[in-house]
Image (cartoon, helix red, strand yellow):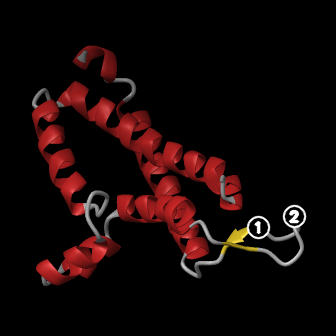
């Protein structure tokens, strides 16, 4: 059975794409200037993966690390993984008269989408600004 909350999946993909685009253009531009960026990024991504509660419960982070809730609040991938978890695992859909209202019943879903939109806009804007600032010097660095 496919949940009705699946209609939000394209929205999450667009928000994920915004964040990925911004981070990707920033890292691609920075890699041209700093040759050791590959090693640095691989270490940071490994740490970032384990800071994001994907393969374990978020309550575990809050219990083990004293600053665990702060780690979750500043981690944009936490909000992305949380939005996917709401859609796929909790897949509870609130509706009065279908198809007028199709919205996950979790009260945290819309704020999570808002945070993801903000993160996506910030990432893509900063990535573009960084690229545009260094665009003229980029051919010389490559």
For the view shown, which residue lies furthest in the front direction?
A: 1
> Element type at marker 2?
loop
Q: Is residue 116 left or right of residue 74?
A: right
Image height of 7 relative to 17, above or below: below
> Which percent across, then down, holds residue 42?
16, 38
Image height of 98 relative to 128, above or below: below
Image height of 131 relative to 44, above or below: above
Q: Is residue 95 left or right of residue 72?
A: right
Which residue lies under the disc numbered 2?
Answer: 99
Which residue lies under the disc numbered 1?
Answer: 102
Quadrant of the rendered structure where residue 54 is? bottom left
> Which percent across, then down, holds residue 43?
12, 44
Observer-nearest residue: 44 or 131?
A: 44
Identity of the residue drawn at 53% across and 58% down: 88
Q: Is residue 29 visible?
A: yes
Q: Are marks 1 and 2 in contact (CB under 8 Å)?
A: yes
> Which percent across, then down, holds residue 103?
71, 70
Q: Is residue 128 left or right of residue 5?
A: left
Observer-nearest residue: 125 or 53?
A: 53
Quadrant assignment for the C terminus:
top left
Identity of the residue drawn at 32% across and 65% down: 75
> Element type at marker 1?
loop
Observer-nearest residue: 88 or 27?
A: 88
Q: Is residue 65 visible?
A: no
Identity of the residue drawn at 21% across and 75% down: 60
Identity of the residue drawn at 76% across and 67% down: 102
Q: CA distance from mark 1 to mark 2?
A: 6 Å
């Amino acid at each position: 059975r496919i949940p009705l909350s699946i209609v939000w999946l394209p929205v999450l993909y667009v928000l994920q794409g915004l964040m990925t685009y911004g981070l990707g253009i920033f890292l691609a531009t920075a890699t041209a200037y700093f040759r050791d960026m590959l090693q640095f990024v691989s270490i940071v991504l490994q740490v970032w993966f384990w800071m994001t509660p994907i393969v374990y419960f978020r309550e575990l982070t809050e219990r083990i690390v004293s600053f665990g809730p702060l780690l979750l609040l500043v981690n944009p991938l936490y909000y992305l993984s949380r939005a996917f978890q709401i859609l796929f695992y909790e897949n509870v859909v609130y509706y009065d008269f279908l198809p007028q209202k199709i919205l996950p019943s979790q009260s945290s879903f819309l704020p999570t989408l808002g945070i993801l939109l903000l993160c996506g806009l910030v990432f893509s804007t900063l990535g573009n600004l960084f690229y545009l600032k260094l665009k003229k010097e980029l051919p010389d660095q490559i």
